[in-house]
Image (tube, rainbow, N blue to C red):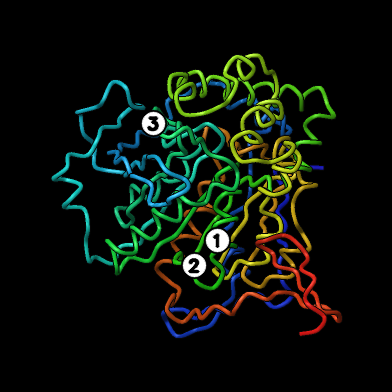
């Protein structure tokens, strides 16, 4: 039992975690870095379980004031055409755009053209949760210490249609939508050649980030990543939500948010897609939304097939950069039973930090602070400033060959039966 909000912390990891060279010449490993980055977890004792922690997020506080400038990117993927937006953290300014989230304005063409740099400041690329954006309070809490330090450059990739961004091709996002983060990482590598790049994802964004890092494998351009409140196995999380009254309440809230998102882009939906707008507006739960939108858009036969394909639990095996997952055992949305413990134990590049309390992206402390801020920022600062990143030489991703002519590809998520005559 957790007394007075004092959460227990456990770590899941490979028996031989990734060895890391420090800039002072000493050696450490990924587990030790994660342990040192993680302070004791003392939460508000009045928010005594995951449901109360999670529901407390509806209490609207202003949160940290983070200022952004936005750039609209044209997708460079021939199939996934259209545009998406990226919000870059900037110095405080007053020229806000009324149609954008608070403290956000567009870049001028000249200012964006002047953005590329040969400096070596670490750069963080952030992915938000379902239907969110750069304005989310949990996200602003998490990046505030990095912003205040002045040592980091930070941007947030908004999922298509989110954070008052336009949908210009009829393509919304899904849980495997790794193409926009991939484009931003490549763009950052090209325009900031000396900056070490890192990634942080929250909830659905954590699932997307994990899929991206796993897909890239040893060729990943990021130097490290943190996945916070990752649902990992979407099929398991969906079934867990549907079997309880409170779970169905969360499903209803998320379904309503997604209905609103589609309603905000009604003209585009009617112009560019064959989605049934009226049927979408009549859904109640998130899984019904996925049935009406994701299956039609992407060709999945059922929403369950979409959940199985979009899950990031198998992609964990393909990760070849230092990767920290941060989860709460009492998270009622990204449920503990969906965490791929065995896959994490198989991969020396991954460590899971699990708190016994915290809810979904909550971790509220007395006074309104959020505990997750500290392990995230501590891990990133340790990796960026203490670890010799150039000394990390990723291994090739295994195909997990068996005694037969078969192998399992963690990205394709299918056992491949090879030609026995080869």
Numbered mark located on residue 75 in the image: none
Decide which of tag 2 and tag 1 comes sooner along the chain.
1
- Residue sitting at x 66%, y 56%: 353
- Residue 33 left/right relative to 314: left
Residue 131 visible, this orientation: yes
Residue 46 visible, this orientation: no
- Residue sitting at x 26%, y 43%: 90
Within 10 Å of disc 1 (Cα), the crowding (few <14, some 14-19, many 20+) is: many
- At which x and y percent is residue 72? 31, 40
Front residue of 381 and 419: 419
In the structure shown, which secondary structural element does the residue marked by tag 3 occupy? loop
Outermost front residue: 421
- At which x and y percent is residue 344? 71, 64
Numbered mark located on residue 220 in the image: 2
- Residue 405 left/right relative to 9: right
Is residue 421 positioned above or below 276 on the image? below
Front residue of 40 and 282: 282
- At which x and y percent is residue 13? 71, 67
Within 10 Å of disc 3 (Cα), the crowding (few <14, some 14-19, many 20+) is: many
Question: Badge 1 is on which residue?
Answer: 213
Front residue of 229 and 302: 302
Question: Badge 3 is on which residue?
Answer: 165
Within 10 Å of disc 2 (Cα), the crowding (few <14, some 14-19, many 20+) is: some
């Amino acid at each position: 039992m957790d007394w007075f909000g004092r959460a227990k912390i456990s770590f899941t990891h490979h028996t031989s975690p990734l060895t890391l060279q420090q800039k002072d010449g000493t050696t450490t490993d990924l587990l030790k870095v994660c342990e040192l980055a993680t302070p004791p977890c003392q939460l508000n004792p009045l928010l005594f379980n995951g449901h109360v922690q999670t529901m407390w997020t509806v209490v609207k506080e202003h949160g940290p004031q983070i200022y952004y400038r936005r750039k609209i990117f044209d997708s460079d993927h021939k199939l996934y055409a259209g545009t998406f937006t990226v919000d870059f953290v900037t110095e405080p300014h007053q020229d806000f755009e009324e149609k954008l989230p608070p403290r956000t304005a567009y870049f001028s063409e000249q200012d964006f053209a002047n953005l590329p740099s040969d400096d070596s400041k670490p750069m963080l690329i952030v992915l938000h949760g379902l239907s969110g954006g750069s304005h989310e309070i949990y996200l602003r809490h998490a990046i505030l210490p990095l912003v205040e330090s002045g040592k980091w450059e930070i941007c947030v990739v908004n999922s298509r249609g989110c954070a008052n961004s336009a949908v210009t091709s009829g393509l919304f996002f899904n849980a495997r939508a790794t193409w926009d983060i991939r484009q931003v990482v490549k763009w950052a590598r090209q325009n900031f050649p000396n900056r070490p790049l890192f990634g942080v994802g929250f909830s659905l964004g954590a699932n997307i980030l994990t899929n991206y890092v796993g897909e890239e494998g040893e060729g990943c351009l990021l130097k490290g990543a943190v996945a916070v409140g990752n649902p990992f196995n979407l099929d398991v999380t969906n079934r867990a939500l549907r079997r309880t009254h409170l779970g169905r309440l969360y499903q209803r809230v998320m379904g309503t948010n997604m209905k609103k998102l589609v309603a905000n882009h009604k003209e585009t939906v009617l112009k560019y897609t064959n989605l049934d707008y009226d049927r979408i507006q009549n859904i109640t739960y998130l899984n019904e939304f996925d049935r009406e939108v994701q299956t039609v858009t992407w060709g999945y036969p059922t929403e369950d097939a979409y959940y199985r394909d979009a899950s990031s639990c198998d992609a964990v095996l393909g990760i070849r950069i230092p990767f920290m997952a941060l989860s709460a055992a009492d998270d009622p949305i990204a449920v503990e039973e969906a965490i791929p413990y065995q896959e994490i134990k198989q991969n020396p590049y991954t460590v899971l930090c699990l708190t016994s309390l915290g809810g979904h992206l909550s971790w509220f402390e007395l006074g309104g602070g959020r505990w997750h801020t500290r392990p995230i920022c501590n891990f990133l600062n340790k990796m960026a400033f203490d670890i010799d990143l150039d000394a990390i030489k990723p291994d090739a991703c295994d195909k997990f060959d068996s005694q037969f002519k078969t192998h399992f590809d963690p990205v394709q998520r299918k056992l491949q039966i090879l030609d026995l005559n080869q």
